[in-house]
Image (cartoon, helix red, strand yellow):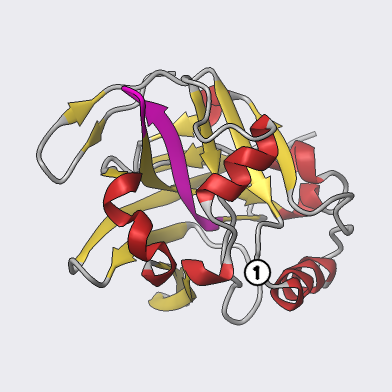
Amino acid sequence: MHLQFTTPEGQAIHPQFDQLVIAGWAGRDAAAIEHHIEELAAIGIPRPSAVPLYYRVASNQLSQRETLQVLGPDSSGEAEVFVFTHGGELFVSLASDHTDRKLEAHSVAFSKQACIKPVATQAWRFADVAAYWDELVLRAWIVENGAEVLYQDGPLASLRTPLDLIGGYTGGAALLPVGTGMTCGTVPAIGGIRPATHFRMELHDPRKNRAIRHQYHCALLPVVA
């Protein structure tokens, strides 16, 4: 799966992905992890077998389109940092771990596989933000009853760093293998996890007053039997 990203300098990069890893339960704070576990338990999703947990998803689920098709009305997004290796460097972008919440109650792995993972079209070099990584902020908005509401808002200080997650997945390597993309966990949903067809997200850099942004709309397909 080929994606295209543009850096702040205007460079276009075209990495190819043949592996996609969803790093779940990626919080640094045990209390915050437990909050998210309880948040999901409230909608019937079982506790994880390990923390963090690395889910594997087909790379063809990556998409940079702004209109997606999903089966039924029970899915929702989660804003997450997305990292990958290109040209010997680690790059940072933004993705949504869009997930079927009804299916998630039966199998988290299958629920993640069932939905496309939207990805932004901008990317930063990790080296350019590594020194103040904890200050970066994830935010997301959904549309409810015709109005946009804040759905997620939290600093990356609450999550494990990409280097920590990459090391846990690779057994200690500092970079992901070329062709592998990884999402790096999320911050809690404000008001609880709930379905939404419109999702807007950003990774904000307060020092340089810039952001990676992406939004998408889900067209619902009927569930027939």
Q: Which residues are magenta?
A: 77-89
Instruction: Quickly name the residue at label 1.
Output: 193
Q: Residue at x 46, y 44 (%)?
A: 82
Is 219 rendered above or below residue 206? above
Looking at the picture, how far across and down is residue 122, in whole percent? 26, 43
Is 216 rendered above or below residue 83? below
Q: Residue at x 62, y 24 (%)?
A: 58
Is 78 rendered above or below residue 12? below
* Picture quadrant of residue 123: top left
Residue 150 on the magenta span: no
Between 172 and 100, the one lying in front of the other is 172
Q: Main secondary structure of the magenta part?
A: strand
Looking at the picture, how far across and down is residue 213, in whole percent? 29, 55
Residue 78 on the magenta span: yes
Between 127 and 145, the one lying in front of the other is 127
**In which quadrant will I find the C terminus?**
top right
Q: Residue at x 84, y 59 (%)?
A: 45
Looking at the picture, how far across and down is residue 18, in whole percent? 53, 17
Q: Residue at x 35, y 60 (%)?
A: 131
